[in-house]
Amino acid sequence: MAAAGDAATVRAMRGYLGGLALGVLAACGLLLLTLQVLAGQEMLPAPQFANSQCVDEKLRAMRLNPPGDANLLVVGSSVAFRHFSGAAAHAIAPGIRPYNAGFCHANIRQTGSATRWLVGRLPEVRHVLLIASPFDFEGCAAGPAAQFPLADVDAYVFGHRDRFAPYFRYFDPATLLRNAATIREVRTNPRLFDSVIVTPYGDGLSAPPWRGLHYDAASVEQSCVDDLAALAGWLERRGVRLEVTLTPVHPQWAARFAGRAPAAALEPRIKAALSATSAAYLAPPRQIGADSFYDAIHMHAAAADAYTRTLVRDMDALIGEIGRPS
């Protein structure tokens, strides 16, 4: 009787495992079919490496247009992504081959992780420009060191991995379907706040309507300043020149929070963090008016074009290599 019972148990277990395997295969097949249908309708969002549409779509754009032979890497958060125009930089100084590696929501520590990854991948990069906002100096100690899994993202962007493969690991069905409903518009409409139009230079220039200052005061964590110093030292050891600037801010926001960590309070701490290295601080231009902004820290695409030209002309080490811009 015991032997018969054991045999029945084995048969039941085999049936359970077989059914489980078939269920997994069916689910995978259904997911793959869904992905193919969405791709055919141009409704397939990027893989959810960061679970942030702005970041994930930027990674997708990098896969479609790899940085390749860039000699200037622009890094930072959304203010780098939105404010640097590669086309404007190349137009005034054709020797510049810029790539904008700004990622929305990145703090200084996360920017450092992304910078190290890309400098390791792009051997012709000899200059890095970090465009930061005061809010980039928050959350470094408590948050994750990187916004996305670097090894998997590297394989996705540079390794020519099958485009559907990451969806089987980084997958949230509710988020996928929600993003699919809007993805065509956010990839084509620069008037949206969450626009993810990405140029071949990696820029995410946009022109949404005014949404108010939107941001409260910023705080500055010493750990973020320390992370900046560590990044400057790492780049110097690699023979890469770092230049750091703070994005211009809306004059009303600067006046409202004067003394509570806008740009003027940050500048000396940034300069101190860079002082032991060859890295330089670029003072932001002061002539940008309130009508250039759509909130406290983000500028319209037209203002970003002029801002980029000013920045490039101020990058003396870069200009020394490629010649004075027109």
Image: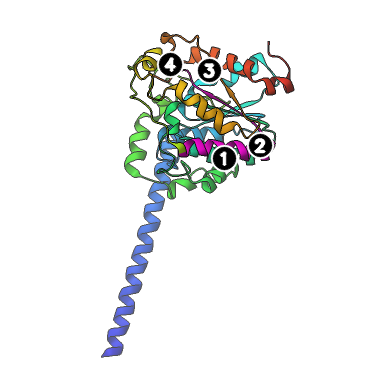
Residue that label 1 marks: 230
- Callout 3, which amino acid? Pro
The Cα–Cα distance between marks 3 and 4, rounded to whole angstroms, is 21 Å
Number of numbered tags placed on the structure image: 4
- Callout 4, which amino acid? Ala
Point out residue 131 in the picture as x, y percentages from the top left corner. Answer: 52, 26
Kindly indicate whether the residue at mark 1 contacts the one at mark 2 (C-beta within 8 angstroms): no
Kindly indicate whether the residue at mark 3 contacts the one at mark 2 (C-beta within 8 angstroms): no
The Cα–Cα distance between marks 2 and 3, rounded to whole angstroms, is 23 Å
- Callout 1, which amino acid? Ala
Kindly indicate whether the residue at mark 4 contacts the one at mark 3 (C-beta within 8 angstroms): no
Along the polypeptide, which appears first: circle 2 or circle 1? 1
Query: Was residue 240 drawn as part of the magenta stretch in this picture?
Result: yes
Query: Was residue 174 drawn as part of the magenta stretch in this picture?
Result: no
Q: Could one spot residue 237 in this view of the protein?
A: yes
Q: Which mark is residue 207?
A: 4
Quarter location, residue 159? top right
Residue that label 2 marks: 236
Along the polypeptide, which appears first: circle 3 or circle 4? 4
The Cα–Cα distance between marks 3 and 1, rounded to whole angstroms, is 23 Å
Q: Residue at x 41, y 10 (%)?
A: 290
Point out residue 202 in the picture as x, y percentages from the top left corner. Answer: 55, 27
Residue that label 3 marks: 284
The Cα–Cα distance between marks 2 and 4, rounded to whole angstroms, is 36 Å
Point out residue 178 in the picture as x, y percentages from the top left corner. Answer: 33, 35
| Quadrant (top left/top right/bottom left/bottom right) for the C terminus | top right
- Is 216 placed left or right of 246 in the picture? left
Point out residue 23 in the picture as x, y percentages from the top left corner. Answer: 35, 59
Quarter location, residue 120? top right
Along the polypeptide, which appears first: circle 3 or circle 1? 1
Q: Which residues are magenta?
A: 223-249
